[in-house]
Image (cartoon, rainbow, N blue to C red):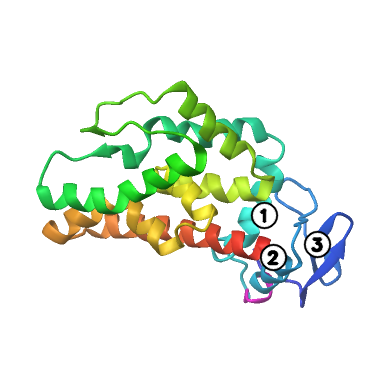
Amino acid sequence: MRRVYKEAKPVPVAGGHGVTLDGKLIKTPGKRDLRVPSATLAAAIAEEWDSQHDEIRPARMPLTRLAATCIDRVAPDRGAIIRQTANYAGTDLVCYRAARPPALTARQQAVWQPLIDWAVLRYDAPLTITTGVVPKSQTESTLRAFAVAVAERNDFELTALHVVTAACGSLVIGLALIEGRLGAQEAFAASQLDESFQIEGWGEDAEQAERRRALAADIEAATRFLLLLRA
């Protein structure tokens, strides 16, 4: 899509803040007004639009995409998004440990166990840890506690949490990030612990490197989205 506007500008609107292109309010792909609760986030979205050149490239506007996802997908189907996100607690990455080699098991213990301990204290949600990949059921009370923690988020926070949880394969890591226990780089490193260990020994192919870059970008964008939302 070619750029035909001259100026993108954040503006106050009823119920929040929007962005205009030459005075016309931006719409989401679902034809809804792109309205966010934070003036700082609206300003950052306007900067994304202003930074486009002759061609508009949505891949370079992650904040716009996250806001539109919230408005078009998360808010209208909030219950389903809560369930999808909370379901990660049932098979959370940090609960599945390797049997060997010792260097990997030690790294998993050092990085993942503090996150599990934090989640137990924060949500009163003990997690069962297992070795291998065979699913291990968590208790109903733990799953309910995590579901409540997810449901407490507003639509914009839920959007970011859903993205990070999916990128990391871990609700524990997602919640740790959204509550400031981890930063974006720490969340990525924790979620990629096993892959990084293998890469250290065997190297990384181009496809794997690209997939990891995409996951890191998703986590970084969601983190920045949260920070701007709360600014």
Question: Label 2: which residue?
Answer: 41
Q: Residue at x 89, y 56 (%)?
A: 14
- Compared with 92, 29 (above or below) is below
Within 10 angstroms of label 2, few (less than 14), some, or many (20 or more) residues?
many
For the residues labelled 1 and 2, the Cα–Cα distance comes to 9 Å
**82 or 74, nearer to the observer:** 82
Residue 67 is left or right of residue 26, and the answer is left
Q: Secondary structure at mark 2?
A: helix
> Is residue 193 at all visible to an observer of this figure?
yes
Q: Quadrant of the N terminus?
A: bottom right
Q: Residue at x 14, y 38 (%)?
A: 99
Whether residues under marks 1 and 2 lie with C-beta atoms below 8 angstroms apart, the answer is: yes
Magenta-colored span: 49-53
Return the residue at label 3. 17
Query: For residue 67, which numbered disc appears in the image?
Result: 1
Left or right of 83 in this view: 193: left
Residue 157 spot, x, y in % from top left: 63, 50
Mark closest to the chain's N terminus, 1 or 2: 2
* Crowding near the residue tagged with mark 3, few <14, some 14–19, many ≥20 C-alpha atoms within 10 Å: some
Helix, strand or loop status at disc 3: strand
